[in-house]
């Protein structure tokens, strides 16, 4: 029982530390004059994915690379099927208003590149540099689009106010001591939580006779998707889930390109043959399932919510059997 409790403790520490790091980094950046746009696309994106990144790096350093790969593949699958499925069963997600076809195509490209590199047998330093290169290209494209959007704004001051309001954790009145406290909590808590979670998840895997990859695909993946799930559930209940689809697309793209881009620079990540036979294709299938909602502007209603969630339950059942 204790490994389960400690795994939960490690996960809670990770989530709280990630949130603290985002708040501290956002407000520090804004206080020293870094534009809110850059903060949104870089620091916030990194901060919200920091738990997955720390888990993956820690897993490789601990000699459990299967946990790292399972975490990313499982998180991307859960982000689509659970993070969109469960809230849709409670209230319709108005994804028809999300104009994210360009980002979606970039996510599909990232997914295809990720799978193609998997057939090399491992993600090594070369694979990591290729993925990071693709990430920088996509971030550069996002910078250009955002800069053009701001230039076309009729009232620049109003655009700046709206931009700052959209940045997660932004508080223009936050004192310096609070900013520093958030940063310290994030920087200390992230590696601590990752270490606790990885160690105890591996104990659970050994106790129940399953591989680190399976634990990564299920327990760790669902755990690290909880922040996105909680946010989307609350947004759905408040009838404000218009951007849920865009958030999932952005999160998945960052997971593929940044996390497995950085992790192989610490140590190679071998690809279990089972991933090539099944799990990578489930991840791709989940990504392709978004086509009706991106290109045909459909809302994700209760029927689709049940279908997505049921698909995920079926997938996890197959993985665990």
Image (spheres, grey):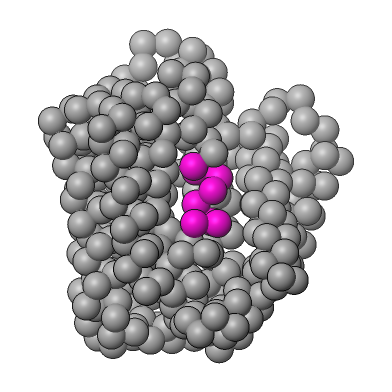
Picture residue at 65% right of the left edge, 46% below the top? 19
23 up-or-down from 274: above or below: above
The C terminus - image quarter: bottom left
- Toward which corner of the image does residue 136 lie, by quadrant? bottom left
Location of residue 126 in the rendering, given as x and y in whole percent from the top left corner? 34, 82
Asked if the magenta segment contains residue 312, the reply would be no
Q: Specify start and end residues of the magenta stretch as a single range.
A: 222-229
Q: Position of residue 213 (x, y in %)?
A: 44, 77
Tell whether 105 sits left or right of 141: left
Front residue of this view, candidates 12 and 145: 12
> Which quarter of the figure has residue 95?
top left
Residue furthest out toward the right = 177
Q: Nearer the viewer, residue 126 or 53?
A: 53
- Point 37% across, 39% down: residue: 84
Q: Is residue 261 visible?
A: no
Secondary structure mainly formed by the magenta segment: helix
Residue 96 position within the rendered picture, expressed as x and y whole percent measured from the top left: 24, 25
Q: Is residue 223 visible?
A: yes
Q: Where does the image place residue 276, in percent across and percent down from the top left?
A: 24, 78
Choose between 256 and 308: the one closer to the eye. Answer: 308
User: Relative to residue 97, is residue 41 depicted above or below?
Assistant: below
In this rendering, position of residue 188 left or right of residue 110: right
Q: Quadrant of the N terminus?
A: bottom right
Residue at position x 32%, y 68% in the image: 318
């Amino acid at each position: 029982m204790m490994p389960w409790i400690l795994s939960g403790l490690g996960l809670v520490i990770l989530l709280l530390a990630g949130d603290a790091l985002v708040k501290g980094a956002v407000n520090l950046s804004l206080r020293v004059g870094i534009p809110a746009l850059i903060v949104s696309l870089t620091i916030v994106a990194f901060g919200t994915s920091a738990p997955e990144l720390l888990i993956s790096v820690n897993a490789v350093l601990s000699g459990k690379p299967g946990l790292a790969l399972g975490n990313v593949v499982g998180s991307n699958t859960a982000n689509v099927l659970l993070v969109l499925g469960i809230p849709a069963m409670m209230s319709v997600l108005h994804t028809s208003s999300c104009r994210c076809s360009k980002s979606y195509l970039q996510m599909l490209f990232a997914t295809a590149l990720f799978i193609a590199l998997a057939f090399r047998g491992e993600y090594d330093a070369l694979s990591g540099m290729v993925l990071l290169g693709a990430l920088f290209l996509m971030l550069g494209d996002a910078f250009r689009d955002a800069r053009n959007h701001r230039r076309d704004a009729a009232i620049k001051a109003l655009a700046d106010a709206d931009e700052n309001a959209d940045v997660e954790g932004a508080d223009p009145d936050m004192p310096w001591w609070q900013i520093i406290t958030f940063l310290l909590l994030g920087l200390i808590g992230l590696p601590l939580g990752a270490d606790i979670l990885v160690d105890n998840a591996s104990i659970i895997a050994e106790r129940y006779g399953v591989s680190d990859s399976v634990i990564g695909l299920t327990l760790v993946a669902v755990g690290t998707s909880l922040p996105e799930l909680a946010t989307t559930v609350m947004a759905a209940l408040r009838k404000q889930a218009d951007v849920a689809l865009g958030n999932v697309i952005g999160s998945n793209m960052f997971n593929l390109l940044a996390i497995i881009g950085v992790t192989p620079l610490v140590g190679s990540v071998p690809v279990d043959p089972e991933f090539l036979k099944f799990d990578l294709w489930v991840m791709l299938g989940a990504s392709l399932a978004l086509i009706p909602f991106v290109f045909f502007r459909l809302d994700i209603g209760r029927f689709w919510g049940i279908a997505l969630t049921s698909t995920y339950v079926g997938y996890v059942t197959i993985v665990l059997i």
